[in-house]
Image (spheres, helix red, strand yellow):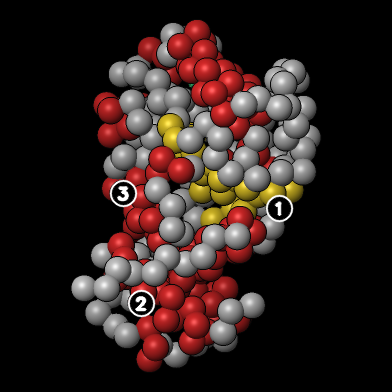
Amino acid sequence: MNHPIDIAQQLLAIEQLVGADWYLPRNRNPLSEPTPAPGARAAGAAAAMAAAPQRRPLAPPPPPEPVEIPAELSPEGKASALAALNNDEVSSCAKCVLCQTRTQTVFGEGDPNADLVFVGEAPGADEDEQGKPFVGKGGQLLTKMITAMGLSREEVFIVNTLKCRPPGNRDPKRDELEACWSILTRQLQIIRPKVIVTLGNPSTRSLLQTQAGITKLRGTWQTLPDHAPGLGGTKVMPTFHPSFVTRCYTAEVRGQAWSDLQMVMEELGLKTPTPKKE
Ligand code: SF4
């Protein structure tokens, strides 16, 4: 467990590195921040969640059809398997009604051999237009979060539970999640990450097959159920969706998100990056 002073010093160093203050209270020195009691922290997060626009709870999808994918794919084999999945199936997929309103599918992007995969909910307007995941306001924050971990977007894999934008960014429907589910599981089977970070309630509930909410699950290691061969037992860290953090931009929420990511860094043996000297 890191000492609070060590964490505060790390946060300051990261601010210098990424030029971002997503994890710090604006215009305030974290070293002078009073440390809330644990109960107060939980109450703060709960209040932030309650104040934010809430989405309806989603029932987890049923178990997908098991698909055998070789366990030992080379990095090149993973890249070509993902490309084949995208080109042969996803880009022209019409398995649910979202194919009628999308501009294009958003398969996901990053290192096919990544140790770390982020799983969000569904493309928004920016993603639908550009065909890339997490490129809107929430995506820009996710990029800063990844940078603060000492990584780049190219070194992780970023994906959504749905590959097509629900019109008006409405909640995904259960039949849409079920239709798209095998694509996500096959992506994960090909990449075989060491850690999956689920962003927000929908991806957390779908992947963990639970109705528990993100406020309860975030910051605690979870284990992926045996959705498909090779996936069972993968470590999962649920955390807030970056869009939620942008809406509830409090020191409490940012501190909790950073704490979750630090647990992931520790699991993957990542060190907090050192800022360059001026
Ligand atoms: S959301 Fe998934 S299942 Fe539905 S059309 Fe798009 S790729 Fe196919």
Q: Residues within 10 Å of mark 1 (few under 14, many from 20)?
A: some
Disc 2: CA contacts within 10 A as few (<14), some (14-19) or many (>=20): some
Image coords of residue 119 (percent x, y): 53, 40
In the visual, does 235 lie left or right of 141?
right
Label 1 vs label 2, nearer the camera: 2
User: Of the residues tagged 3 and 2, which is closer to the observer?
Assistant: 2
Residue 181 in view (yes/no): no
Tell which circle, 1 or 2, labels the residue nearer the N-terminal end.
2
Q: Label 1 is placed on what type of residue?
A: Gln
Q: Which residue is mark 1?
A: 222
Taking the view exactly as shown, the residue that stands out farthest to the left is 278
Q: Residues within 10 Å of mark 3 (few under 14, many from 20)?
A: some
- Give SS at disc 3: helix
Q: Is residue 15 visible?
A: yes
State yes or no: Cβ of the residue under disc 2 lies below 8 Å from any atom of ligand 1. Answer: no
Q: Disc 3 versus disc 2: distance between alpha carbons?
A: 20 Å
> From mark 1 to mark 3, how far is it between C-alphas?
26 Å
Q: Could you give the CA–CA distance between mark 1 and mark 2, rounded to whole angstroms? A: 29 Å
Residue 26: x percent and y percent? Answer: 28, 75
Residue at the (49%, 28%) spot, across then down: 162
Pointer 2 residue:
12
